[in-house]
Structures are given as structure tokens and as C-alpha cells.
């Protein structure tokens, strides 16, 4: 945007309040999230810098949220032009505005934080006004509002309508004492924003509501300020997918805030005074594109005190990395044996297990390591999200795992916005464990695959009385098996061992949720038999009623699973996911029953090397 020189001169005359609020040692950190802004981001950074320069101490943190164009290059150019003030932050994969702002905050140093959209459709001239209102109202947070009487906005009617509807919903559900939550210009004290970000779960468009709800519930006062908005002809983000995501997140915030009271009780672990060394252990059959992807992602970690140990079957040349890397050939052995060797060769206080077909987000290590400052924590895990670049059938497989009627209470393993919690079972595709605890336990049992991680977690929680903490920010992207063949073979292996473990290790495996698919299969077998018999005895009324009851339940099941996979803009994905959910229920149910009836697993009585589809080291369902 080209803001008038007269406007900028007028703004410079009223910076006294800003300097007063900042104090002698204060600093303003301007966080500017950017996605697909190649054409304007460098100029917009320069505009904000020119406005603030000479008026208040400041830094600008433009955050590229995994843009596919040259936004990142333009941000680097802006940083080269003004290295004193511009400190860029880069997020490898587009993960949502909320996530981008949190990454920017973690890299900031300011006593006060301004969140300002990178497209600059909001005039930065108003920054000084935000400080004035913060001073007058003694507020910890000042947010821009389109409904403020002094606001000047150029905003299309359909956006106004959507904003009004959303505002009404927010007032009903959350009761925030503000008239607008979604304007991309907000000023926080560092204390208020840190309190909210430490507890925030939403990574997409409803993050504004969650941050403000958390801060308001704690008692941080919120005031509103006028804005100047020039929306122009841009399309914006009012798509069906984004609207659906925002509404889901809004309802989740209401549930966590009003019903679960989650934000009042969530555990926030302190950072370690002396960051411990972390040993990242990756078991794999051989080098691959996925392994290269994982090693590259490890190079982007915000936490730098770590080493990596890769355990392939045969040796290969060690690639150049910015961190210590060991390649240790193991021969053709099971993943558990590889990981145990990795534990022996590790030097870290914490061992982080990562699959070779998974790659972490930049704050993966940082999000998990802090929990080990708590003495009762033995392990930490985080979700494995389907990568956005996976092929169509793999994306469909990921949607099946994410479906609430497939994963049930364990959906947090595949979704990045579930609440933090203590768990007693977690897959090794994304698991951190204290080294002393692993040494005490003796590492993984090597007579099971898959399922060895279930036994390890059982030893940690039940035998050693330590907690395993799940944190949704300790996230990795985990490539999925494509529907239908490879996916069902993987599901079948999980179910077979889970069924057997329900008998051998019932503490964490003999659970109703794991048995539901088997009941589903049995119910269908009985229902089909009733339908067949009823045809032979058409005059038998009880049989006819049983037949109708079965068909009604089956119809309800088909409807519920259809709605749970809803994707109206992508009908082929919808249909494929729906079929995937149903055949997953059938495959899991049959194999779980087989496992319960088996005296031993095949891997207990025969050598079991890598299967042909290279499915060597992946987490459980």
C-alpha cells in the first residue's frame, strides 16, 4: 500500500504515547505473516520500517508460511536491505496463520508484540493509535476493529456479512467483550501473548479467537482501536474449506473454554536452563527420498543441541549436514533391534525416535524437550499429520486415519489440534524418551513387530510410573500408505497385534474402542444371516422385525460414515475416503479377532525382515 506522506508525518507527531508504553528498555516486535505475497512483501516491510524508524525501537519479523512462490526470496532481500531491523522467519510447510505467528513470536525479543498481516491491507499509520489506547485504557491487548466508530474501511458486502455472522456466533459461544476478533492488526504485551501462545492449539484462521479467549479468561484486559482498511480487489480467504475449518475450530474453542475448562488447567512446562542434548534415532532399510526429506527438515530445527543417528541395513555415504550425523549399518534386522542399537550409540539425555518416512516441523524438538524439565515425565509424543504433498490415494488413506469413527479416542495421533494430555501408549514414529529410562528398561523388545512401542510405553507408564505427555505442537508429517491395498495390509498388521496384545498386555490394549470393529464384523455376519433366513420364513414376524432392525442400523452406519468424510467440493475424495473407512473397519475387525485367537504372533516364531513394500518402521493405529 502507498500511504500518504502527510499521513506518515502526522503519525510521527504522536509517538510520545508509544515511547511511554515501551519505557526505556522496551522494544516493539512487528510480526508479519506472509503467504503468496511475492509481489508486495518486500515493499510492505520497507513501509513499516520507514514508519517506525526514528520513532521507537523496533524489529520486524516477516514469517513466510511455506509459500510456493518467491515470497521467501523477497523477504530475504528485505532483510539484506535492512539487517538492523528485519529478522526473517521461514516455515517450510504451509501450516496456517496461527502457527506462523507463533513461530514469529518464538523468534522475537520485544516487550510488546504487534501482529500485522503481511499484505498490509490495514494501514500501519494506526500503530501509534494502538499504543495511545493501550496507555489510556491500561490494556494488555489492543485489537483493531472494523466496527469502531472511527474506523475507515473499504470492505466488500459479502465479507461484511460473513463478519457479522461470525461475530454473532462468537458472542453467543464465547462471550468476548469485543466487537471484532478477526482484524489482522493486534498489539499485545509480551506477557499476555506468551500466556496465550503457551496454551494455544488452533493453527489456522480461528487462532485470533482462541488467543483472545485465553487472555481474556486469564484477566488480561482487551481494548479496541480504529483501523483503516483497503481490501481492494483481492479474493481473500473466504473459501468453503476455510469457513469449515474456522467453524470447527470455533466450536472446539467453545468446548475447551466453557465445557472442558482446558485453558485453566493446561500444563506449561518451563524451558531448561541448560538445553539437553537430544539424539534423534531413525531406523530405515536404505537411503530414500523420504529419508533425505527427514534429514533436511532436521536441519531447520529451532532447537540446535541435537545429533542424528541413522540405522540402515547397509552402509551409505554420510550426507553433509549442519548437525552431527552418524550412519550405522545394522544388516537386515527388525526396527526394534535398530532402535536399540541407536540407543546404545546415542550421547543425548533424550532419545527422539523418528520414522524414515516422517519429517518434523521446525519447532519439533523445541516443543517436546521442555517437558523433560518435569521429573515425572518419561516420554513425549506428538501427532503425525498427512503431508499436503502426498498423492491422492495416500491423502485418502490419511483422511481415513483422521476420521473420528476410525481412530476414535486416539485421533490425536493424526490431528494437530487435539488438547495436551497424558497418554499410556504412543507410536515410535514420533516419540521422545529419557535415555536413563530406556537404559533401565532395556530398550525395545525385539520379538514383536509391530507393537514393540506399545510394550515400551507400558513399561514407562505402568512399571516405571512415569508420564508420557502428548503435545500437538511436537508435530511431524508422516507419509501414508495409499488406499486400498497397502493401507489395508498396514491396518491388518496393527489389528492383528492389537488383538493379540489385548490378551497378552491387557492394561493398554484390552479396551472397548479397539474391539468395536470386531463387533461391527460380527454384527454384519449375524445381520446377513438373519436376512437370509428371513427370506426362507417370510411369515415369521420376529425374523422380519430383526431384518428391518439390522437394515436400519446398517443404513444409519452408512449415513454417519458418509457425513464424517464430508468433502462436497471434492466428491471423488469424499467417495474414496468413505469406502476407505468402511473397508478399514472390516479389515481391522477381522484381524483383531484373529490376533485374539492366536497363541503367538508370526514374528515370535520366525525371523521377520522388511516387507516388500518397505513398511519397516511405522507407528500403530
Image (cartoon, rainbow, N blue to C red):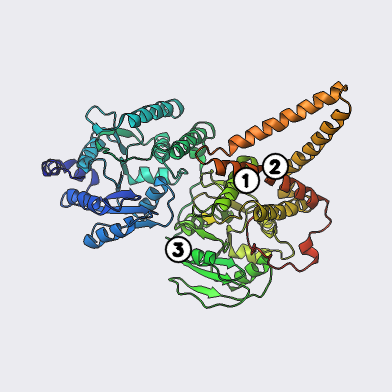
Q: Callout 3: 10 Å neighbours few (<14), some, many (20+)?
A: few
Q: Earlier in the sequence, mark 1 or mark 2?
A: 1
| Residue identified by numbered label 3 | 274
318 relative position to 237: left or right: right
Relative image position of residue 63 (x, y in whole percent): 34, 53
Q: How many marks?
A: 3
Q: Secondary structure at mark 1?
A: helix
Q: Is residue 393 above or below residue 358?
A: above
Judged by depth in the image, the label closer to the viewer, 3 or 2, is 2
Q: Is residue 127 above or below residue 46?
A: above
Which residue is drawn at the image coordinates 59% and 34% (left, top)?
563
Q: Nearer the viewer, residue 369 or 547?
A: 547
| Residue identified by numbered label 1 | 410
Q: Secondary structure at mark 3?
A: loop
Q: Is residue 311 above or below residue 620?
A: below
Which residue is drawn at the image coordinates 52% and 41% (left, top)?
570
Residue 513, numbered label = 2
Q: Nearer the viewer, residue 331 or 106?
A: 331
Q: Earlier in the sequence, mark 3 or mark 2?
A: 3
Which residue is drawn at the image coordinates 52% and 66% (left, top)?
289
Residue 522: quadrant of the picture: top right
Judged by depth in the image, the label closer to the viewer, 3 or 1, is 1
In this orientation, does residue 566 appear?
yes
599 relative position to 230: left or right: right
Q: CA distance from mark 3 to mark 1?
A: 34 Å
- Mark 3 and mark 2 in contact? Answer it, CB < 8 Å: no
- Which quadrant, please, contains the N terminus? top left
- Mark 1 and mark 2 in contact? Answer it, CB < 8 Å: yes
Q: Secondary structure at mark 2?
A: helix
In this orientation, does residue 177 appear?
no
Q: CA distance from mark 3 to mark 2?
A: 42 Å
Q: Callout 2: 10 Å neighbours few (<14), some, many (20+)?
A: few
Amino acid at each position: 500500500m502507498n500511504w500518504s506522506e502527510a499521513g506518515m508525518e502526522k503519525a510521527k507527531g504522536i509517538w510520545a504515547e508509544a515511547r511511554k508504553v515501551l519505557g526505556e528498555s522496551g522494544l516493539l516486535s512487528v510480526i508479519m505473516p506472509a503467504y503468496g505475497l511475492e509481489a508486495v512483501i518486500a515493499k510492505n516491510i520497507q513501509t513499516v520500517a520507514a514508519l517506525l524508524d526514528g520513532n521507537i525501537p523496533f524489529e520486524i519479523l516477516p514469517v513466510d508460511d511455506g509459500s510456493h512462490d518467491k515470497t521467501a526470496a523477497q523477504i530475504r532481500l528485505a532483510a539484506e536491505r535492512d539487517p538492523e531491523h528485519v529478522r526473517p522467519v521461514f516455515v517450510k510447510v504451509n501450516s496456517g496463520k496461527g502457527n506462523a505467528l507463533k513461530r514469529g513470536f518464538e523468534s522475537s525479543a520485544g516487550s510488546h508484540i504487534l501482529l500485522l498481516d503481511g499484505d498490509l491491507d490495514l494501514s500501519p499509520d494506526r500503530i501509534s493509535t494502538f499504543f495511545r489506547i493501550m496507555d489510556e485504557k491500561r490494556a494488555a491487548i489492543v485489537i483493531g476493529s472494523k466496527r469502531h466508530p472511527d474506523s475507515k474501511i473499504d470492505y466488500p458486502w459479502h465479507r461484511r456479512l460473513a463478519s457479522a455472522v461470525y461475530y454473532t456466533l462468537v458472542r453467543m459461544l464465547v462471550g468476548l467483550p469485543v466487537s471484532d476478533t478477526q482484524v489482522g492488526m493486534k498489539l499485545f504485551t509480551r506477557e499476555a501473548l506468551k500466556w496465550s501462545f503457551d496454551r494455544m492449539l488452533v493453527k489456522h484462521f480461528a487462532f485470533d479467537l482462541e488467543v483472545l479467549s485465553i487472555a481474556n479468561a486469564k484477566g488480561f484486559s482487551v481494548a479496541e482501536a480504529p483501523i483503516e482498511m483497503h481490501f481492494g480487489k483481492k479474493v481473500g480467504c473466504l473459501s468453503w474449506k476455510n469457513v469449515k475449518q474456522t467453524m470447527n475450530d470455533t466450536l472446539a474453542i467453545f468446548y475447551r473454554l466453557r465445557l472442558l475448562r482446558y485453558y485453566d488447567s493446561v500444563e506449561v512446562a518451563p524451558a531448561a536452563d541448560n538445553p539437553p542434548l537430544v539424539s534423534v534415532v531413525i531406523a530405515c532399510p536404505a537411503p530414500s527420498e523420504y529419508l533425505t526429506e527427514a534429514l533436511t527438515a532436521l536441519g531447520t530445527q529451532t532447537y540446535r543441541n541435537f545429533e542424528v543417528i541413522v540405522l540402515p541395513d547397509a552402509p551409505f555415504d554420510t550426507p553433509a549436514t549442519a548437525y552431527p550425523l552418524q550412519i550405522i549399518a545394522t544388516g537386515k534386522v527388525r526396527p526394534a533391534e535398530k532402535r536399540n542399537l541407536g540407543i546404545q550409540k546415542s550421547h543425548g539425555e533424550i532419545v527422539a525416535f523418528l520414522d524414515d518416512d516422517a519429517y518434523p516441523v521446525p519447532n519439533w524438538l523445541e516443543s517436546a524437550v521442555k517437558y523433560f524439565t518435569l521429573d515425572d515425565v518419561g516420554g513425549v509424543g506428538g501427532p503425525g499429520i498427512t503431508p499436503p504433498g502426498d498423492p491422492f490415494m495416500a491423502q485418502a488413506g490419511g483422511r481415513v486415519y483422521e476420521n473420528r469413527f476410525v481412530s476414535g479416542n486416539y485421533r490425536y495421533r493424526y490431528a494437530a489440534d487435539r488438547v495436551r494430555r497424558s497418554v499410556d501408549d504412543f507410536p515410535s514414529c514420533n516419540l521422545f524418551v529419557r535415555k536413563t529410562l530406556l537404559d533401565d528398561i532395556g530398550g525395545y523388545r525385539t520379538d514383536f513387530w509391530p507393537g514393540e512401542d506399545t510394550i515400551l510405553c507400558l513399561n514407562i507408564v505402568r512399571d516405571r510410573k512415569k508420564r508420557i505427555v502428548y503435545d500437538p505442537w511436537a508435530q511431524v508429517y508422516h507419509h501414508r500408505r495409499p488406499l486400498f491395498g497397502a493401507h489395508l495390509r498396514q491396518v491388518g498388521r496393527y489389528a492383528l497385534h492389537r488383538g493379540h496384545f489385548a490378551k497378552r498386555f491387557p492394561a493398554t490394549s484390552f479396551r472397548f474402542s479397539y474391539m468395536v470393529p470386531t463387533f461391527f464384523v460380527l454384527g454384519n455376519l449375524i445381520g446377513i444371516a438373519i436376512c437370509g433366513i428371513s427370506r426362507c420364513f417370510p411369515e415369521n414376524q420376529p425374523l422380519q422385525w430383526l431384518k428391518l432392525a439390522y437394515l436400519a442400523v446398517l443404513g444409519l452406519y452408512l449415513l454417519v460414515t458418509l457425513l464424517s468424510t464430508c468433502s462436497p467440493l471434492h466428491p471423488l475424495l469424499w467417495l474414496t475416503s468413505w469406502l476407505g473407512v468402511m473397508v478399514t473397519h472390516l479389515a481391522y475387525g477381522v484381524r483383531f479377532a484373529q490376533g485374539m485367537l492366536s497363541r503367538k504372533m508370526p514374528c515370535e516364531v520366525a525371523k521377520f525382515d522388511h516387507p516388500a513394500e518397505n513398511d519397516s518402521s511405522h507407528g500403530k493405529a
